[in-house]
Amino acid sequence: MSEASVAVHADADLLAQAVAARLLVKLLDAQADRGQAAVVLTGGRIAAAVYRAVAALPARDAVDWSRVDVWWGDERFLPAGDPDRNETQARAALLDQVPLDPARVHPMPASDGPDGDDPEAAAARYAAELAAAGPGDAALPRFDVLMLGVGEDGHVASIFPGHPVGDATGPVAAVRDSPKPPPTRTTLTLPTIVTAAEVWLVASGADKATAVRESLAGAPLPAAAARGTARTRWLLDRPAAASVQGGAPS
């Protein structure tokens, strides 16, 4: 797998703008190479800022959004449209403002969906959707970019340190008793995350500094295990990078 590179930006606003610009370039490059692109979205404050920045960039219109597949790395198992769902956040900030093909937008199932309040069935349904989009007999599609936020404890997606979901081997897992509310979620597993061509770990704020430092040092944290097959990028603002030894290379 790839070695990690680190880019540090002065503050959260500049970080969001820089990640947005990188994302547009990556989508354009993927479409130039393959005719299409696939991105895995995350949630959280900095992710929402990135999506708003993408929507505000004139270059967004250079992307053929009808040839972009949108997936999610994890989701809160809540009713459709709930403001705490990552899907709801992404739609409000970006997805409803670009001409995506609805058939290529793949939200994780909601708790009022066809599986009701069964997160294991919802995880299995999403795994089947991933497999249906994979080339040939592949269990997963190609992910050009998989974006992850980084929690204060070093979690990514809904994979928390010490939680049994960290040992899950299937493509998608249900999460019960999450240490962070809400307690029930669905998530891509680490074996799925590490199939992405590029994994981007985006972190903002001084409360992330310890997790960033420990993950880059190889601590046994989910964030340290999240790597892309071609490239792993840590995209940070200065407060999040404050504890990185040597000042965080760019």
Image: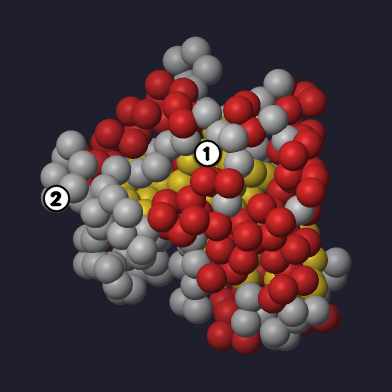
Instruction: Reply above or below: 190 against 53.
Output: above
Is 35 positioned to the left or the right of 167 in the image? right
Q: Secondary structure at mark 1?
A: strand
Residue 115 placed where, x, y %? 16, 40
Residue 138 placed where, x, y %? 47, 21
How many marks are shown on the rendered structure?
2
Q: Which residue is mark 1?
A: 70
Q: Nearer the viewer, residue 2 or 114?
A: 114
Q: Nearer the viewer, residue 25 or 81?
A: 81
Give the residue displayed 71% in from the left and 56% down from the top. Answer: 56
Image marks 1 and 2: residues in contact by CB distance under 8 Å: no
Give the residue displayed 35% in from the left and 44% down from the top. Answer: 108
Is 235 positioned to the left or the right of 126 in the image? right
Q: Is residue 32 visible?
A: yes
Give the residue displayed 74% in from the left and 39% down from the top. Answer: 61
Q: Nearer the viewer, residue 122 or 223?
A: 122
Give the mark nearest the N terminus, 1 or 2: 1
Outermost residue on the right side: it is 250
Quadrant of image for the N terminus: top right
CA separation in Å, label 1 and label 2: 24 Å
Q: Secondary structure at mark 2?
A: loop
Q: Is residue 194 visible?
A: no
Label 2 neighbourhood size at 10 Å, few (<14), some (14-19), many (20+)?
A: some
Is 152 positioned to the left or the right of 241 in the image? left
Toward which corner of the image does residue 233 lie, by quadrant? bottom right
Residue type at mark 1? Answer: Val
Q: Which residue is mark 2?
A: 117
Residue 5 placed where, x, y %? 77, 60
Label 1 neighbourhood size at 10 Å, few (<14), some (14-19), many (20+)?
A: many
Quadrant of image for the C terminus: bottom right
Instruction: Reply above or below: 116 against 201.
Output: above
Residue type at mark 2? Answer: Asp
